Amino acid sequence: MRFGSMELEEHTAAWVAGWSAIRGFQVRTGPGYLAAKHPDLDGGWEYVCADPAREAFAVLAAEVTGSAHRSLSIIGPNIHEYVKWAHAAGMGMVSTSEHLMVCAMETQDNEDPFLVDPDLRLVVKHLGSRSSASVCQARLTGAILRGDAILARGSVAIQGEHAVFDGLETHPGHRRQGLGMMMMKSLTARALEYPVTTGLVLASTGGQRLYHKLGWRSLSPMTELVPRERLAELARL
């Protein structure tokens, strides 16, 4: 981590804790990084760090390239620098499209949205106990349904003063109807029942447009890097 990156490091650590708790991932920590055991990597580890200096990157790259079932996700602004270092270390870039986004929770609405369609139902429930949610105070998951069909869904974890949102998605046949925004507003209202000050979400390109409309801002892009042999496997898929 470089000078001026303390906010980025704090938000990165909170996001990893909340994201991994929602998904039930095992997490471990090391000098300058957190790692989550990720099923998409065949049980390998996804290492996450915030804007590393070159020396710290080299240490992490040596760890990650020890197995094709590992990846390194860097939350930081210096994409070209990270990719250059990665190539020198035997790694390649998968994506830079996702952004870690942030908002001041006091600016968000604390009431559930009104569902105009009487056939729609909004359901929000707690996931497991506090102990199963790791260090998070609570995990909640929500859905908007018509009958038994899920039209939109999402989750939020309460991690100290942070509300970490994850998995917000709308069924392809029901997009552009405002359902994603209603789902997000409902989860936000439930999160505000806790003493949270900051919202965090890792957003895709499409998701970024929604969150900007709700008053969120981009904190940093995420650069996803994998060992070169893993990159070759992905190219064959």
Image: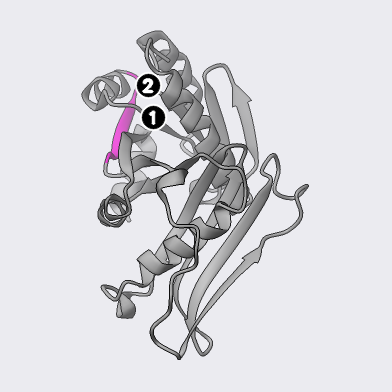
One can see residue 66 in this view: no
Q: Is residue 77 visible?
A: yes
The amino acid type found where label 1 is placed reads Ile
Give the residue at x 35% y 49%: 203
Report the front residue among 212 and 78: 212
Taken as a whole, is the magenta stretch helix, strand or loop?
strand
Residue with the mark numbered 2: 51
Residue 170 position by quadrant: bottom left
Question: Residue 125 placed where, x, y %?
Answer: 64, 67
Secondary structure beneath dot 1 equals strand
Q: Residues within 10 Å of mark 1 (few under 14, many from 20)?
A: many
Q: Which residues are magenta?
A: 89-96
Residue sitting at x 59%, y 52%: 22
Relative image position of residue 77 (x, y in whole percent): 28, 26
The residue lying at 32 percent from left, 79 percent from top is 174
Q: Residue at x 70, y 48 (%)?
A: 133
Label 2: which secondary element: loop
Q: Amino acid at mark 2?
A: Asp
Q: Quadrant of the N terminus?
A: top left
Q: Which residue is mark 1?
A: 74
In magenta stretch: residue 92: yes
Pick the residue in front: 70 or 202: 202
Other residues around mark 2 within 10 Å, as few (<14) / some (14–19) / many (≥20): many
Judging depth in this view, the residue of 203 and 179 nearest the camera is: 179
Q: Is residue 161 above or below residue 143?
A: above
Say if mark 1 contacts mark 2, CB within 8 Å.
Answer: yes
Q: Position of residue 111 (x, y in %)?
A: 49, 64
**In the picture shown, does residue 77 fall above or below 168?**
above
Residue 204 rendering spot, x and y as whole percentages = 32, 51
Magenta stretch: includes residue 91: yes
CA distance for labels 1 and 2:
6 Å
